Image (cartoon, rainbow, N blue to C red):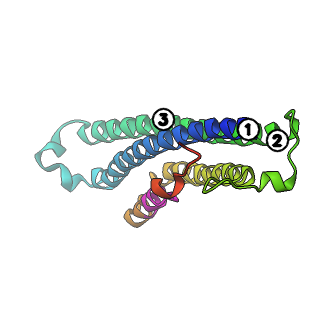
Amino acid sequence: MEATVKKYQQKFKKVKDDMDRWDDLQARLISQFRNASSIIGRLQLLEDPKNYGSLKNMDNVKDSIFRKQMESLQTIMLSMNKTLEELNAIVSSLAKTFRDAKQQLKGGSIQFSMKQLNHRIGIKPSIADCLEGLRLLHEMYQSEYLLKSSVISALGSLALKPSVSDLHAFEQLLVDQPNIPKEEGKNEVFE
């Protein structure tokens, strides 16, 4: 039983590393999104010749500036897709950790009874609690990845018909991910 608990502790340490990596990628994605939103917000202004002042008499200045902004937007969109791929890799890692933990119980040399799976030693969670925690973490991060992916794919179509309120709503969807305070997620399993 103690060997199984040690293996679960290792799994939770890996999950904690994945969660920390997710936080870093989340911050990057929000920054990329804000940069893309700024460009999308400027596109409407670039359409109006009044905004060019004395530059409007120069040949192709409007088209040149608009093209540069679109190129920058495309570069940012590619970066956001790469960030999404990294987030998806974390979701896959969480899924693998959960599958491995479940398989460890089924295929291990020791078969645990339900009583043993739910047995607690002091304040430490039971093996069943650990397994359920891994499942919940995977589901939560997978759902969050799907939401982020949908928002980023919708951003591309928003570039054609920019709306400040839609951009703010999309940004809020990205920012308001389920937050697990580190203190609540931390317990003796991580130690």
> Which of label 2 and label 3 is nearer to you?
2
Question: Where, quadrant-wise, is the N terminus in this rendering?
Answer: top right
Identified by mark 1, the residue type is Thr
Q: Residue furthest bottom?
A: 165
Viewer-closest of 33 and 50: 33
In magenta segment, residue 177: yes
Question: Which residue does the numbered mark 2 point to in the structure image?
Answer: 105
The residue under the point 48% across, 35% down is 78
Disc 3 crowd rating (10 Å Cα; few below 14, some 14-19, many 20+) is: few
Q: Is residue 161 visible?
A: no
Across and down, in percent, residue 58 comes to: 17, 38
The range drawn in magenta is 169-180
Determine whether, in the image, residue 113 is placed left or right of residue 156.
Answer: right
Give SS at disc 1. helix
Q: Are marks 2 and 1 in contact (CB under 8 Å)?
A: yes
Q: Residue furthest left?
A: 54
Residue 14 is drawn in which quadrant? top right
Question: Which residue does the numbered mark 1 point to in the structure image?
Answer: 4
Identified by mark 2, the residue type is Leu
